[in-house]
Image (cartoon, grey):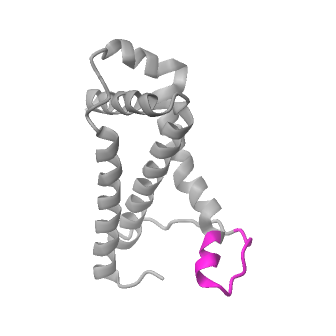
Amino acid sequence: MRNFIDIMLLDSIVRMKKIDPEWKGSFIFVFTFFGAVDFFTIGLWLKYYFQILSIPTLKVDLFPPNIYLISILNYAPGYCLLYGLPAFIIIYFLVFYKGRYLKLRKKYPDVKGNKYYQVIFIVGTVIFAFSSATIIYVIKGPLI
């Protein structure tokens, strides 16, 4: 399993280097965002399906509370800290800590960046989140 994760990350790095020479920022943004979505989905499962977790929320009143869709943005900083920060830390230590991506490149020199692991990861995350939200909606009804 560890080799698969290493190859997936290295394949995504090689693919992003082909597109953007300054690949580090976009790489960490993409993998942090979709990792946070995965953590959020797992948190929803633990809260609504298994009923073993109470998700704390951090609300910052930046937007007026009377407009529903805009007032949801008041919870965005809390969710970024709760789900985005752990995803960022994991990606940082898996890829960037002590130049690990250079060591991976030496370990797997035949990775060419054509396996589309990044696309599979993104599509898998979207399918996982959508199907989980649908199942939780069917079981519990509307969450809001």
**Residue 60: percent from the left, percent from the top?**
71, 68
In x, y percent, where is residue 139?
29, 80
* Residue 40 magenta-highlighted: no
**Residue 94, how many percent across, how many down?**
44, 30
Expressed as whole percent of the image width and height from the top left, the position of residue 143 reads: 43, 80
| Quadrant in which the N terminus appears | top left
Q: Nearer the viewer, residue 29 or 20?
A: 20
Q: Which residue is drawn at 60% across and 83% down?
A: 68
Q: Which residue is drawn at 40% across and 84% down?
A: 142
**Residue at 46% in and 20% down:** 100
Q: Residue furthest top?
A: 106
Against 88, residue 10 (above or below) is above
- Residue at image coords 50%, 30%: 93
Q: Image height check: is 35 above or below 136?
A: above
Picture quarter containing residue 134? bottom left
Span colored in magenta = 60-73
Q: Is residue 66 above or below residue 3?
A: below
Question: Which quarter of the picture shows residue 105?
Answer: top left
Which one is nearer the viewer's eye here, 99 or 25? Answer: 25
Q: How many labels does the image show?
A: 0
